[in-house]
C-alpha cells in the first residue's frame, strides 16, 4: 500500500530565487488545478488539474509534471541551506494548492526546518484549510470580491467558503497577508475595498493588506492554453490603489 511519501501531485512550475512570494529568497512550487475561473487570471496554465500541452508560435510546451511527495521534498531540502541563510523558505502557490492539500501536506512533513508559506484563494472545505493552516508558518490569502453575486460573476464561484476560511485564518496564530488584485472597476471599487477592510478588522494578531496592481499582460497566455481572454472592464483605466480605507480600520496596507 502506498504511504505518504508516495503521495503524488501535479506541479506546473518550480520557481527558484523568488523574491515576491514571501519573506526572503524562496522557492515557489506552483500546483496545477484551480476551482476558480477568475476573469483576470494570469496563470491560465494552472487552471486545469491535468498536464496539458501549450501551443504557441515558439512551439509546443508541456506543462504539468507528476511528482511524489518524497521527490519534491528532497529537491526542496537540497536548497535548504541557501533558503535558510537568505531568511526565506518554500511557498506553495498555484493554481490552488488546497486542491492538492494531501500532497502539499505530505511534502511539508518532509521538509527540513524550512519556513513554509501557503498562497491560496481560500476556496476549499474547512477541514482541508485547517489541516494545512496547522502545517504552515504564513498564509498569503488572496481576497477578490466581497459581494457573493459579483464574486460568482467574475470567478465562477460564490465566496461563502472563502469568507468562512478567512474567518478561521483571522482567529488563528498564523502570520498572514491578505492580498487584493486591483482590477479596474471590479475589485478596486470603494465599496469593495471597504467591505474587505471590515471583514479583516477582526484579525486577532497583526497582519497586512497588499494591493496588487493589475497585470495587463494577463491575457498573453490564454491562446496557448486554448482559452479565450475577454476582460469585461477597461484595462487602460488606472486602478484605484486607495490604502486610506484600511487605515481608517487600523489596518496596515501597501501597494506592491
Image (tube, grey):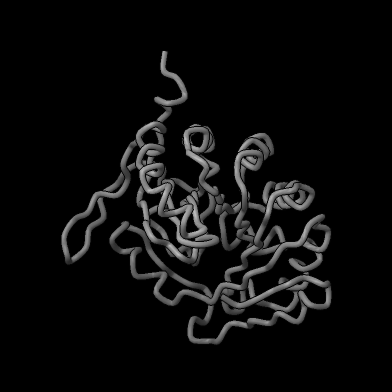
Position of residue 67 measured from the top left corner of the image (x, y, whole percent): 34, 36
Q: Is residue 213 above or below residue 74?
A: below
Position of residue 27 measured from the top left corner of the image (x, y, whole percent): 42, 54
Quadrant of the drawing holding the C terminus: bottom right
Position of residue 51 measured from the top left corner of the image (x, y, whole percent): 32, 43
Q: Work out whether residue 39 or residue 83 is closer to the camera in this orientation and state it.
A: 83
Quadrant of the drawing holding the N terminus: top left
Q: Is residue 7 above or below residue 89?
A: above
Q: Residue furthest bottom?
A: 237
On screen, residue 199 versus residue 93, left or right, reads right
Residue ID at (35%, 63%): 222
Q: Is residue 232 above or below residue 105?
A: below
Total numbered badges shown on the rendered structure: 0
Q: Work out whether residue 78 or residue 180 is closer to the camera in this orientation and state it.
A: 78
Residue ID at (82%, 72%): 250
Position of residue 39 measured from the top left corner of the image (x, y, whole percent): 50, 64
Residue 237 sits in quarter: bottom right
Q: Residue furthest top?
A: 1
Residue 131 sits in quarter: top right
Residue ID at (44%, 54%): 83
Q: Is residue 21 above or below residue 164?
A: below
Residue ID at (32%, 45%): 64
On screen, residue 132 versus residue 65, left or right, reads right
Q: Work out whether residue 154 or residue 29 is closer to the camera in this orientation and state it.
A: 29
Q: Work out whether residue 146 or residue 100 is closer to the camera in this orientation and state it.
A: 100
Amino acid at each position: 500500500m502506498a504511504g505518504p511519501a508516495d503521495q503524488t501531485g501535479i506541479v506546473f512550475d518550480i520557481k527558484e530565487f523568488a523574491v515576491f512570494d514571501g519573506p526572503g529568497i524562496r522557492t515557489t512550487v506552483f500546483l496545477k488545478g484551480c476551482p476558480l475561473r477568475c476573469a483576470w487570471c494570469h496563470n491560465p496554465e494552472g487552471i486545469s488539474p491535468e498536464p496539458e500541452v501549450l501551443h504557441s508560435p515558439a512551439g509546443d510546451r508541456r506543462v504539468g509534471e507528476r511528482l511524489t511527495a518524497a521527490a519534491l521534498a528532497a529537491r526542496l531540502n537540497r536548497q535548504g541551506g541557501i533558503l535558510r541563510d537568505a531568511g526565506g523558505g518554500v511557498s506553495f502557490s498555484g493554481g490552488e494548492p488546497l486542491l492538492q492539500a494531501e500532497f502539499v501536506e505530505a511534502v511539508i512533513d518532509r521538509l527540513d526546518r524550512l519556513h513554509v508559506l501557503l498562497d491560496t484563494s481560500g476556496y476549499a472545505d474547512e477541514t482541508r484549510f485547517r489541516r494545512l493552516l496547522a502545517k504552515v508558518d504564513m498564509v498569503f490569502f488572496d481576497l477578490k470580491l466581497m459581494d457573493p453575486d459579483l464574486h460568482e460573476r467574475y470567478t465562477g464561484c460564490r465566496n461563502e467558503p472563502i469568507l468562512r476560511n478567512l474567518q478561521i485564518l483571522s482567529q488563528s496564530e498564523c502570520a498572514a497577508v491578505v492580498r487584493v488584485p486591483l482590477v479596474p472597476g471590479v475589485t478596486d471599487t470603494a465599496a469593495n475595498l471597504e467591505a474587505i477592510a471590515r471583514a479583516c478588522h477582526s484579525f486577532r494578531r497583526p497582519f497586512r493588506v497588499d494591493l496588487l496592481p493589475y497585470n495587463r499582460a494577463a491575457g498573453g497566455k490564454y491562446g496557448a492554453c486554448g482559452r479565450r481572454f475577454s476582460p469585461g472592464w477597461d484595462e487602460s483605466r488606472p486602478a484605484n490603489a486607495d490604502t486610506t480605507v484600511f487605515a481608517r480600520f487600523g489596518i496596515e496596507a501597501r501597494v506592491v
